[in-house]
Amino acid sequence: MAKSKSPKDVAVVIATHKKYRMPNDSMYIPVQVGAEGKETDLGYIKDNSGENISAKNASFCELTGLYWAWKNLDSSYIGLAHYRRHFSFSKKSKEPFDNVLKYSELKPMLKRFKVFVPKKRKYYIETLYSHYAHTHYASHLDETREIIKKMYPEYLKNYDVVMGRRWGYMFNMMIMRKDLFSDYCEWIFSILFELEKNIGMANENLSGFQGRFYGRVSEILFNVWLEQKLTENTLKNSDIKELKFVYMEKIDWKRKGISFLKAKFGHKKYEGSF
């Protein structure tokens, strides 16, 4: 198992399932997700080391990396990014890796902010709920609402508020102070494990792509948790810092746009990334 050193105050896991170019910065920890039962060794730390849920990767996606970070890291700030998508402080170069957030850029902001999130993703003609319902299956969100109603009723109002929004902090990307990070992980995984228990068997016939819905549900739920913390005054808006994000590969925006229109008006679910 490869070892990675990171500054004591910040550790950002990069979830990856294949060998890929990684940022040359000590705060990043590449983690091979879905390592359980696989012979492939990418040379990165594996998510089946320590306390883990690596075996759930086929449906939980990068969340097995999030869980690994929660249970196995002890930095003051802990975060998650992706091999194809990273935080960025500024976009100065045509070379994507030159624009990836550096520890030297993040460090001065640690005293001012408790939570770092990717820039809002705006949907304009869709709410978070309707976009999910058109591209995936609304039943996942409906069941999640019932779980929250039973387990965390104080969150229900903000769940409904977030579902009606036309923007969100997406991608399961964040960097947070450890106590907040732990609070979020405790909350999100308790809900997702209950969701898995309640509807896991009912979704066995989903395609491999659609079967990865736990990761997609959690993208929206992160916004619910964040809104609740603001409501409780655990966080203030001034504690949260939006950061740019960069893609390491080109996005096929034309295909994505066509797929979105087919989903919204033709009831054709997404069956692949873009």
Image (tube, rainbow, N blue to C red):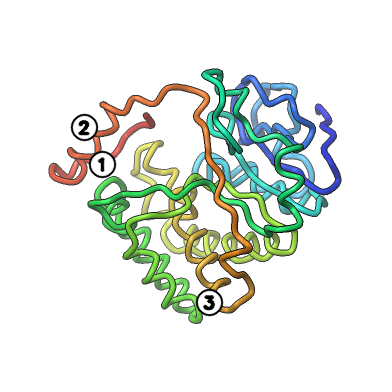
Measured as percent of width and height from the top left, residue 162 is found at 39, 65
Q: SS for tag 1? A: loop
Residue at the spot of label 1: 269
Quarter of the view holding residue 138: bottom left
From the image, tell me which residue sits under label 3.
Answer: 231
Relative side of 104 to 115, left or right: right
Task: Please state which of residues 68 and 36 is positioned toward the viewer in this rendering.
Answer: 68
Instruction: Please report the residue visible at 48 percent of the width from the left and 61 percent of the height from the top.
Output: 223
Name the residue located 80 percent from the left edge and 54 percent from the top edge.
76
Q: Amino acid at mark 1?
A: Lys
Q: Secondary structure at mark 2?
A: helix
Closest to the observer, 245 or 142: 245
Q: Dot 3, how many residues are within 10 Å of its Cα: few (below 14), some (14-19), or many (20+)?
A: few
Q: Nearer the viewer, mark 3 or mark 1?
A: 3
Please state which amino acid type lies under the numbered disc 3.
Thr
Number of the front mark, 1 or 2: 2
Q: What element does badge 3 sit on? A: helix
In the rendered view, would you say 133 is above or below 239?
A: above
Q: Quadrant of the C terminus?
A: top left
Determine crowd level at label 2: few under 14, some 14-19, many 20+ residues with C-alpha closer than 10 A.
few
Q: What is the number of callouts on the image?
A: 3
Density class for disc 1 (Cα within 10 Å; few <14, some 14-19, many ≥20) is: some
Q: Which residue is mark 2?
A: 258
The residue at the point 63 percent across, 44 percent down is: 80
Mark 1 and mark 3 in contact (Cβ < 8 Å)? no
Position in image of residue 161 (x %, y %): 37, 70
Left or right, 212 with reference to 122: right
